[in-house]
Image (spheres, rainbow, N blue to C red):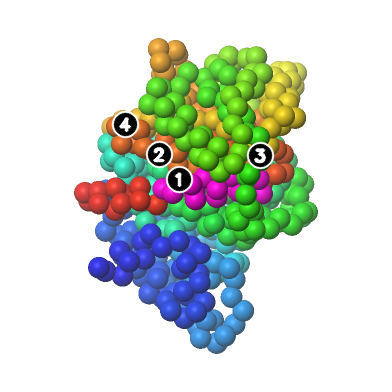
Amino acid sequence: MTMHEELAYMSATELALHIRRRQLSPVEVVDAFITRIEQRNPSLNAFVYFGFDEARQRARDAEQAVLRGDPLGPLHGVPTAIKDLFDFKPGWKSTFGGIRALKDHVVNAYCLFAERVERAGAIVLGKTNSPVMGFRGTCDNYLFGPSRNPFDLRRNTGGSSGGSAAAVADGLVPFAEGTDGGGSIRIPAAWCGVYGYKASFGRVPFVARPNAFAGDTPFLFEGPITRTVEDAALVLSAIAGYDPRDPFALDEQVDFLAATRRSIHGWRIGYSPNFDVFPVEPEVATVVSRAVRAFEEAGATVEEVRIGITRSQRELSDLWCRLIMPINLLTLDGFAAQGIDLLGAHRDDFPPQYLEWVEKTRSMTALDFYRDQCIRSEVYDAIQRVFERYDLLVTPTLACLPVENADDGNTVGPREVNGEPVDPLIGWCLTYPVNFSGHPAASIPAGLSASGLPVGLQIIGRRYADADVLTASAVFERVRPWQELYQRCAARPL
């Protein structure tokens, strides 16, 4: 077995420990993962930018730090990846999700995830694929094309952090960055059979400029995509914590790793098979209903609940599109101020669905915006009422199995589920209501469908109760371990 095959599915926690004990060197670890990426990424299209030269230099520096006996961060020498969307590293290209006009665009700044994981010793190998401006639940664009699901290369990874989830599932990196404005960590985690964690709003700072307050409508997040709950807790330990640049950042310490070792005995868990209003494919429903029994086996009580959502799923998906567009319009306006008129000469770089929402929301008034916030408040109140009775709320992560990739750079989700029309951009995602509310949530591998495709289970906790979500996730992982799933990815044809 080659070095890259030996290390591919080692956890970030194990890699960091072996490096700290001088059983592995950062140089050999980084070289092994670069070799694996070079061999496997062409068939997967998970990575779209490679920072290998810089990564190798950082690995050499990391090795010298080990040999000198310097203090080492919790992720010292561990390879990772960041996303090619609103995610930056100085000198690296940033295409904002495969916009052709921005194929050589460079942002000389750090996103918080890259800044903090590097501070913790991690080594960023490159950037991963995303849809244009992150405005859909699939991963495809006109510049790079679709990312392919390592469980079935004909199918999509989910988005918008699709390249990151595919890379983690295929053993290209042990963890990667996701961002989440409507489910973009949890959606691809569900379709790629990995663990995706979206923290409570404010737990992981979200640094945005020129509008420092941009992260609240809907709530936007950066977070880890991993193969183990412990790795997610380890990464959260590195990226969470107060930052004065974020007006919403929480100044509170949480022992995320300790949370993974607790019990859920005696907990009350509310189970919603459809978030009240979403049609859910039978194959998904079967896997999820079977998975929730794991909590009962661990000593919790699980009861089916009605959340109290009064709006239709189409009303809610349209609401999400309207709420997310202002930050998009501001970004486009910023490029225009730099002399890059993306909606003029480069209009064809955008999918038609995106352009439709640009036109729909350009003329929105402040009153329209506040009316939408009233609807959003209804969702928040409904979820909050569930937590008057229950410790956790669990649902399917998504309503459907991974869709087949299109060949035109514009893969979308299903237009109907169980015969009911849904918005193909995000209407099949039971994730975005939690971006209305800001509760912590994770997608955990629930098992495989009858057709052999991954299904995700969404675990939602009380506001700021990140520890509870991690506890329940870790308990589920112990009762229903999923690591053997990745043998399917490892054995896939290249």
Which callout, 4 or 1, points at the residue further toward the start of the chain? 4
| Crowd around label 4: few <14 · some 14–19 · many ≥20 (10 Å) | few
Hey, what amino acid is under mark 3? Trp
Q: Position of residue 214 (x, y in %)?
A: 68, 39
The amino acid type, in three-letter code, at marker 4 is Ala
Which stretch did the figure color magenta?
467-482
Q: Identify which amino acid the numbered label 1 is placed on.
A: Arg
Say which label, 4 or 3, has the lower sequence index.
Answer: 3
Which mark is first along the chain, 1 or 2? 2
Q: Mark 1 points at which residue?
A: 480
Q: In the image, what residue occupies the spot 53% across and 40% down?
A: 297
Which quadrant would residue 461 be assigned to in this image?
top right
Q: Given the current orientation, which residue lies at the most extreme left position?
A: 493
Query: Mark 1 and mark 2 in contact (Cβ < 8 Å)?
Result: yes
Q: In which quarter of the image is the N terminus?
A: bottom left
Please name the residue that numbered disc 2 is placed on.
Answer: 447
| Rendered location of residue 462, percent (x, y) | 70, 38
Name which of mark 3 and mark 1 comes first in the sequence.
3
Secondary structure at badge 1 equals: loop
Where residue 152 sits: x, y (%)? 29, 39
Q: How crowded is mark 1: few (under 14 residues within 10 Å), some or many (20 or more)?
A: some
Residue at 50% from the left image edge and 30% from the top image edge = 396
* Residue that carries the numbered disc 4 in the rendered image: 450
Q: Which of 155 and 352 is in front in this view?
A: 155
Main SS type for the magenta part?
helix
* Residue that appears at 45% across and 14% down: 421
Say whether residue 165 is left or right of residue 375. Answer: left
Mark 2 and mark 3 lie on one chain; the one further toward the N terminus is: 3
